Image: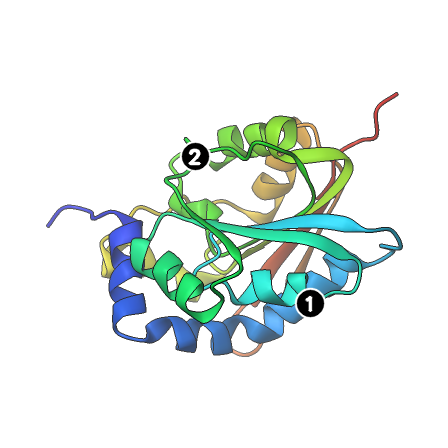
Amino acid sequence: MGQRDATKLFSEWADNGRDEGMERGHTPSVTVMLERLLEGVTSPFTAIDIGCGNGWVVRKLANHPLCTHASGVDGAPSMIQKAKDIDPQGDYVEAMLPAWAPREPFDLVHSMEFLYYLHDPFAFLVEVHQRWMSPGGKIVIGVDHYAENPSSLDWGESLQVHMTTLSIEGWMQGLTKAGFVDVKAEQVGAKEGWSGTLVLTAVKPELT
């Protein structure tokens, strides 16, 4: 059987209410990711969540006292519709990635469980670096499917969707080649049979 588009899978999950389980399951890792993203932030900022699902991380960012605008983008129509139903005043964009790009750059970028669905995540990271982020901006990426997490390696086959499998070092090198600096990686929530969420942070250099 051939592969299907991941956006269709996630729309089905939103229709079936599985997005709520995803939110609960990802909350511990995302809590750490947001701590890393917001560490040292003392000035007003804008933020975007790439692969925002039902928008729960966008709403967390929007509630931060220094956040002036938070946005989310996702290619799954039912996920974006659910985000808009929950938060009618929020900024949620239904768009296929990597083709879409925002009109204005953001200071902070968050992405949980999205990038490995792309066939060339590093080409997209170049676009994010060049077009999505302000100089001095920070990005945090969370991935559960990676080479050092053996229990995740059959997900693509079982879900019948494309997944790009990369090592921790591969992700770090990809971010560096895309132009990011201060690239860091950590595994969060590891336990027996589970290597944890790979959390990557990086910075777009200031203009010189």
> Hey, which residue is sitting farthest front in the picture?
89
Looking at the image, which residue is at 20% across and 47% down? 3
CB within 8 Å, label 2 to label 1: no
Instruction: Look at the numbered disc 1 and give the secondary structure of its residue.
Output: loop
Crowd around label 1: few <14 · some 14–19 · many ≥20 (10 Å)? few
Residue 98 is labelled as 2
139 relative to 171 in the view: left or right: right
168 relative to 45 in the view: left or right: left
Q: Quadrant of residue 86?
A: bottom left
> Hey, which residue is sitting farthest top in the picture?
208
**What quarter of the picture does the C terminus occupy?**
top right
Q: Position of residue 102 (x, y in %)?
A: 54, 35
Residue, disc 1: 63
Q: Position of residue 187 (x, y in %)?
A: 64, 63
Instruction: Look at the numbered disc 2 and give the secondary structure of its residue.
Output: loop
Q: Position of residue 163 (x, y in %)?
A: 36, 47
Q: Is residue 1 above or below residue 88?
A: above
Looking at the image, which residue is at 68% across and 32% down? 176
Crowd around label 2: few <14 · some 14–19 · many ≥20 (10 Å)? some
Mark closer to the chain start, 2 or 1: 1
Residue toward you, 171 or 82: 82
Kindly report which numbered mark, 2 or 1, lies closer to the viewer in this rendering: 1
> Of the residues shown, which amino acid type is indicated by label 2?
Pro
Residue 199 is labelled as none
Residue 189, visible in the rendered structure: no
Residue toward you, 53 or 193: 53
C-alpha separation, residue under disc 2 versus residue under disc 1 = 27 Å
Q: Is residue 17 above or below residue 111?
A: below
Looking at the image, which residue is at 70% across and 48% down? 46
Residue 124, visible in the rendered structure: yes
Residue toward you, 92 or 174: 92
> Of the residues shown, which amino acid type is indicated by label 1?
Asn
